[in-house]
Image (cartoon, helix red, strand yellow):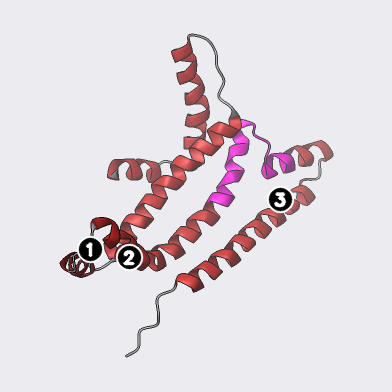
Amino acid sequence: MRAYTGIIRGVPELLIILLTYFGGTALLSAIAGGYIEINAFAAGVAALTVVFSGYAAEIFRGAINAVAPGQREAAAALGLSNAQIWFLIIIPQMIPIALPAFCNLCISLIKDTSLISVVGLTDVMRVAYIGAGSLRAPLPFYLAASAIYLALTSLSLLSFRLLERRYSLPAMKG
């Protein structure tokens, strides 16, 4: 698992998208014995899933490790099963720890969708690029694309703040 997350986190997202699209096409063509092109949408979703999962795995690993080992030991001493320990002790304590980093990762994923336009998939950036090229007026199109991404990330940020407030740890009283 560490090798996977290390490789995925060390390779640029754009390269993973290109490898998934062109490498997937080459792999399927070699297996089938004829040319088979991978769908750009499927390649984009798969590549961003691979990237997202690599970062998310590290976020949750760190959050799980942040739960004090004594919590598990106490739960086991009380006779709780492994499932009960996870669902009643570990997960409720790791959610507030993991949520801020996970929310940032989700916002990064929204912005990373602009990278899939390099494989020909029509997304916000691809439409802006085509419009800017056809009318030779890039500023309005790229400003509109910026506004769309800003709106999406702002709505996501608001949603995540509500989640963080819901799952926040109670303040320590001294």
Mark 2 touches mark 1? (CB < 8 Å): yes
Judge left or right: residue 86 versus residue 103: left
Residue drawn at x 39%, y 42% as measured from the top left: 8
Q: Which residues are magenta?
A: 109-129
| Mark 2 or mark 1: whose residue is earlier in sequence | 1
Residue 31 to residue 61: above or below: above
The residue that label 3 is drawn on is: 145
The residue that label 2 is drawn on is: 88
* Residue 12 visible in the current orientation: no
Of circles 3 and 2, the one toward us is 2
Residue drawn at x 66%, y 54% as measured from the top left: 149
The C terminus lies in quadrant: bottom left
The residue that label 1 is drawn on is: 80
Few, some or many residues within 10 Å of mark 1 (<14, 14–19, 20+): some
Q: Main secondary structure of the magenta part?
A: helix
Judge left or right: residue 131 versus residue 73: right
Among the 4 quarters of the image, the one containing residue 5? top left
Q: Amino acid at mark 3?
A: Ala
Q: Amino acid at mark 1?
A: Leu
Residue 135 to residue 108: above or below: above
Q: What element does badge 2 sit on?
A: helix
Q: Looking at the image, which is closer to me, 158 or 51?
A: 158
Mark 3 touches mark 2? (CB < 8 Å): no
Q: Amino acid at mark 2?
A: Leu
